[in-house]
Structure formats: C-alpha cells, structure tokens
Amino acid sequence: MTINKLLVVIIIIFIKFGGCEKVFKSVPVVFKIYENESVLLPCYIQDNETVARVKWYKNNRLLGDTLDQHTLLPSRMYMHRNYSLQIDSLRAHDTADYTCEVIRPEPLGPIKQSHSIEVQCSPSVRTIPEEGFLEVRKGEYVDIGCEASGTPKPTIEWRKNGEAMALLEHRSRIRFRAEHRLLAGVYECIADNSVGDPVKAAIRVIIQDAPVVSAVRTFVHTAIGLRAALQARLDFAAPPAKTAWFRDGRPVKTDDRIIIMGHENSHQLIFRTVRKSDLGNYTFRAENKLGMADVSFKLTGVPNVASFKVDPSLNKATSTSFTLIWEVDSYSTIIEYNLWIRPYYGSRSPIDPDSVSTVGPAYFWSKIVVPGDSIDGPIHSASYTVRGLTPSTVYEATVTSRNRFGWSKTSAVLHFATEPGVGRTLPVTIDYADITPTLEEPESEQPENITQAHVFERLNEMPMSDSGAREKLNVIVISFLICSIIWLS
Ligand SMILES: *[C@@H]1O[C@H](CO)[C@@H](O)[C@H](O)[C@H]1NC(C)=O
Ligand SMILES: *[C@@H]1O[C@H](CO)[C@@H](O)[C@H](O)[C@H]1NC(C)=O
Ligand SMILES: *[C@@H]1O[C@H](CO)[C@@H](O)[C@H](O)[C@H]1NC(C)=O
Ligand SMILES: *[C@@H]1O[C@H](CO)[C@@H](O)[C@H](O)[C@H]1NC(C)=O
Ligand SMILES: *[C@@H]1O[C@H](CO)[C@@H](O)[C@H](O)[C@H]1NC(C)=O
C-alpha cells in the first residue's frame, strides 16, 4: 500500500510560515479526504538538523511522543521513523488540526508545524422542529430550520410546495409571520456539499385561520318535482370546521327527501323532489375556533338569466328593424318576456349637457312585452323583430323573463346596429359599419327608467365576486409578505 495511493484529495494551502521554513522540508497542508481512507501527515526535517524528540498533537492534545513509547497513539494511527503520522480508516471525528512539535538540543527551542484534516462527509439534516411539522395560528411566527452537518459545510436551498424560494442567502433558519393561510405549505430544505448526494428534509407548516367557503352557483333554478342540489366548497379549514346548512337562520331539517352530503371539501344540500315550500334562501356555514364563513344560496323557480344569441344569419338587420334572438333556462313555462331597447350613445350619461336636451327621451329604455311559449323547457328560445328603428344607429337591448315563480334577472346587454338608409339619423355620428352585435356583461347599476323595480331585484348577490376580489388582494398581501420575510441570523 503506497502512501500516494492513500492521499485521494490533497489541496495544499500554506497556513503559515512561522519561520520554520529552514527546519522543515515539509509544508503545512490541508487534507480533504473521504471517510475510510488513509492519510500521511509529514513532519519532514532538514538533514542537517538534530532532532531530540518529536511530539504529535491533535488540536493541542498530545497524541504521541518519540521518547515516550507509552504515550499510546490511538488505534488507526502510526508514527513512522521519519516522524510522519499515518491515520487509517478516517472517521468524521478525525477532522482536526494536527501539530508536529520538533524538540531540538539546547539552546534551540522547539518548533512546530500544523496540518489540517477535513474528512469529507456527505450532508445530513435535522429539521427544526424535529418532527417536521409546525402548526401556528394566523398572526403568530413561523420559525423553522434545517440544521445540516457534513464536511465541507453544506449549503442549504429552500423550496416551498415544490417551488424554489428566491432567498438571497443560504439560510438554515426561516422565520416569518403567519399573516395569511396561503403562507402555509411544505417547506423543504436541500443540503448539498458536493460529497455524496444532496439530502432533503421537509417541514409541513399549517396556519390556523377561520374557514373559507365558496360556491360556483348560488342561484339555483329548479321546479316542483325535480331534484335540486346546492353545492358549497369548503376551501380551507384548519383547524377542521363544523359545517351546517341553514334556512332563514335555522338548521335545515333533513329527512328522506332532503339530504346533507359532505365529501372532502364538497358539501351538498340535496332535494330529491323539490316542493314549493323548499324554495327560498339557504346558507352553508363552516365554523372553527378562529371564526366562521358562510355562503348563501337561493333555490328558486324563477327563470335563469336569458342570453342573447349573436348570429348574423339570424339577427336580420334592415335600416329600421332588427331581429333579436335569445334563450333562457326555465323548468316552468315562460309567461312573458320584457325586452328593453334604447339607442346607445357610448356611455350611460352623455358628458355634453347640450346633447342631453338633443337626445331627450330617446335616451330612456323602451319596454316591449313579448309573449312566452307553452313549452315546459328546460330551454326556451324566443325571437322578436324590433321595428321602427332609426337607420345607422346603434342600440342596446336587454331581456327579462317571467314564469309562474316570478321575474328573472336582466340579461347581459346586447349592442346592435341598424343598416344605413334614407331619412333622419340621430345627431350622434357613430362608425356603425364596425358595429356587429356584441354582448356586454350586465351592469351592476339598474337601467334607468324602469319602474317595475322587482324585475331587477338582486336575487343573486354572488359572494363569488367578493371572494375573487379577496383572492386578488391575498395575492398582493402574500407577495408583500414574501418580500418582507424576516430571517433569523
Ligand atoms: C466507511 O466504512 C463504513 C463501514 O465499513 C461504511 O459503513 C461506510 O459507508 C464507509 N463510508 C464510505 C464513505 O465509503
Ligand atoms: C540547515 O541548512 C539550511 C539550508 O539548507 C540552513 O538554512 C540552516 O541554517 C541549516 N541549519 C543548521 C542547524 O545548520
Ligand atoms: C516517511 O516514511 C513513510 C513510510 O516509510 C514513507 O511512505 C514516506 O514517504 C516518508 N515521508 C517522507 C517525507 O520521507
Ligand atoms: C332571500 O334573500 C334575499 C336577499 O338576499 C331577500 O331579499 C329575500 O326576501 C329572501 N327571501 C326569503 C324567502 O327570505
Ligand atoms: C320612461 O321612458 C318613457 C319613454 O320610453 C317616458 O315616457 C317616461 O316618462 C319615462 N319615465 C321616467 C320615470 O323617466
């Protein structure tokens, strides 16, 4: 076994010169060597020097002495005749500074040379907390970490829910305020020191907060005798929430016909066969010790919101007429439609006060009553040709539908244009050539000059839009929080 073969990785660093260069032929060395291998630490002295005695120290603790054979060199260690110290089967705890002290005859003083051994060890990590799990209340601090050992010292990278965290430094400790439940997740650290494979450890962080609920459809159209289901989602519940369905503030009484079902995050209130008395307002509520959340539903027989069809081959336009086509879902016969029409001026309120007088009453909506059909549904289609329109003019239209349960909400607004023709045009010039019928989302404000207020009764306040805005805000809050994460040094 040759010594050269034993030295696998040797990086020579001159630690210090200390005036010994005349005595020692060898130089101080840092040995970076893998576990189980051997190393030879030189203590090579100039031939013209007289050596009385040599001692080896490990971090200043005596290991061996040439004049005292009884100073027991630990097992795996051997001092050669040329004073080199050989260490076999290196262990992690052999990482240390080793000093050879040469004692010369009086009056010359002793001189020393030191080497370092770094036994290369693949990394290992210990999480903080050790169980890899941390649950805090919203507003409290999350304090997690990964203590990595290994030689050389491993660097630590962090991931949250599988995504790299853009941290400026390789921190072993992360501390931040649990401002939002979305800061919860699996935080994973990866320790790497290029010796062996990187190792990973994960800490699952749970942030307790009031529950969050949502629903896709809160306005549920039905009819007597049909099956109907109200569906709520429990988007978040830590700690777990108690859930319940209410009608007019009282818990819903369940029986063979009205059933509550809950599976994972999905919660349903099912009516096997709807009775007239079932129609009404319902609330799904989730509650834990940190708060509660609810989402309201309306189980109703009134028609769903109608939608205009945009199809040039069917929307026949002339200079004075236009054919509107729409569809509506209703399990019951539609008794009548109200079609609301008015010229379109590009905005709800003309900015130029003069134009108000010019436009006059034409600004207001005109109502056209269109008879319903005798079909049971569920899909009803209707068309109506509006006559007596002004040529080259853009109009807007909206429609409501009534069945025996009442009026639906207003549809989205349709914009359409009449063809050019001879005759008077309105004193507003619009490049009508570009106007194809287009649908606009319903406006939150009600159309002016509609006296039958109940037609536009807001039956269906969608909490969804609210929560959508909340989520957006959350994203902003979280971006801010991530930017302001506080680190422990
Ligand atoms: C060193 O030897 C021990 C026991 O023989 C073994 O368990 C360990 O994996 C070895 N280490 C390396 C880095 O080969
Ligand atoms: C030994 O030789 C070196 C040069 O080779 C010299 O610098 C040193 O002083 C000598 N030491 C003694 C004790 O003569
Ligand atoms: C010291 O002795 C060992 C064993 O005989 C040998 O392998 C090594 O090369 C020697 N070192 C020097 C610096 O002469
Ligand atoms: C249902 O709730 C709406 C408000 O969301 C309310 O105007 C209406 O009167 C309620 N209906 C019943 C039957 O309580
Ligand atoms: C509503 O509009 C009509 C014309 O379509 C008009 O005769 C009526 O006075 C308006 N009502 C109100 C309250 O403005």
Image (spheres, rainbow, N blue to C red):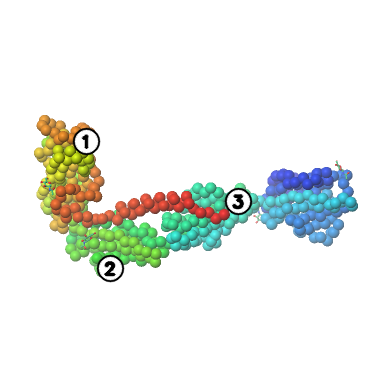
Q: Is 96 or 379 nearer to us in this picture?
A: 96
Whether pointer 1 and pointer 2 mark residues with C-beta atoms closer than 8 Å, the reply is no
Whether pointer 3 and pointer 2 mark residues with C-beta atoms closer than 8 Å, the reply is no
Q: Residue 85 appears at what percent x and percent y? A: 78, 52
Q: Residue at horizontal 52%, vertical 58%?
A: 144
Q: Is 350 or 15 nearer to us in this picture?
A: 350
Q: Residue 259 appears at what percent x and percent y? A: 27, 65
Image quadrant in which you'd find residue 285: bottom left
The disc, 3 or 1, on the residue closer to the chain's N-terminal end is 3
Q: Mark 2 — residue?
A: 251
Q: Mark 3 — residue?
A: 154
Q: Name the side, left or right, on which 272 lies relative to 16.
A: left
- Extreme right residue here? 106
Mark 2 is surrounded, within 10 Å at the Cα level, by few (under 14), some (14 to 19) or many (20 or more) other residues, namely few
Judge: label 2 CB < 8 Å from ligand 4. Answer: no
Q: Residue 141 appears at what percent x and percent y? A: 48, 59
Q: Is 29 or 462 nearer to us in this picture?
A: 462
Q: Residue 288 appears at what percent x and percent y? A: 38, 65
Marks 1 and 2 sit apart, C-alpha to C-alpha, by 52 Å
Would residue 435 be seen by someone viewing this image from the given angle? yes
